Amino acid sequence: MAATAPATDTLDLLEERIQRTVALVSTLRDERDMARLETSEAQETNTRLSAELETLRADKAEVRARLEKLLGHIDQISAA
């Protein structure tokens, strides 16, 4: 019976290592999935902010053009 005790201990150690490995793989998969989700959300945010920036730039150009036009009118009044 003494011969089976070391084999049982070895089997117990192997089982424990396998369980730890399975837990680690599960944790790593969860972390990978979260990282993918965060990356996807970051890309969506980046796309939305890029579109918003383009809109703001267009608005700025329009406001600048209108102000230049108004300043031109003021210059015409001053020159008259």
Image: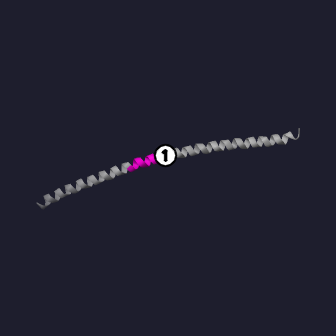
Pick whichever, 20 or 79, lies toward us.
Answer: 20
Is residue 43 shown in magenta? Answer: yes
Q: Is residue 75 above or below residue 30?
A: below
- Colour style of the rendered protein structure: one colour
Task: Indicate the quadrant containing the N terminus: top left, top right, bottom left or bottom right.
Answer: top right
Q: Position of residue 50 (x, y in %)?
A: 39, 50
The image quadrant that residue 77 belongs to is bottom left
Give the residue pinned by disc 1.
Answer: 40
Q: Position of residue 42 (x, y in %)?
A: 47, 47
The outermost residue toward the top is 1
Pick whichever, 70 or 28, lies toward us.
Answer: 28
Q: Position of residue 3 (x, y in %)?
A: 87, 41
- Residue located at (71% from left, 42% from top): 18
Q: Main secondary structure of the magenta part?
A: helix
The image quadrant that residue 11 belongs to is top right
Amino acid type, callout 1: Ser
Is residue 49 shown in magenta? Answer: yes
- Residue located at (81% from left, 41% from top): 9
Q: Is residue 66 left or right of residue 13?
A: left
- Residue located at (20% from left, 55% from top): 69
Pick whichever, 56 or 3, lies toward us.
Answer: 3
The outermost residue toward the bottom is 79
Q: Is residue 18 left or right of residue 63?
A: right
Q: Is residue 46 left or right of residue 6?
A: left
- Residue located at (33% from left, 49% from top): 55
The outermost residue toward the left is 80
Element at label 1: helix
The boundaries of the magenta stretch are 42-50
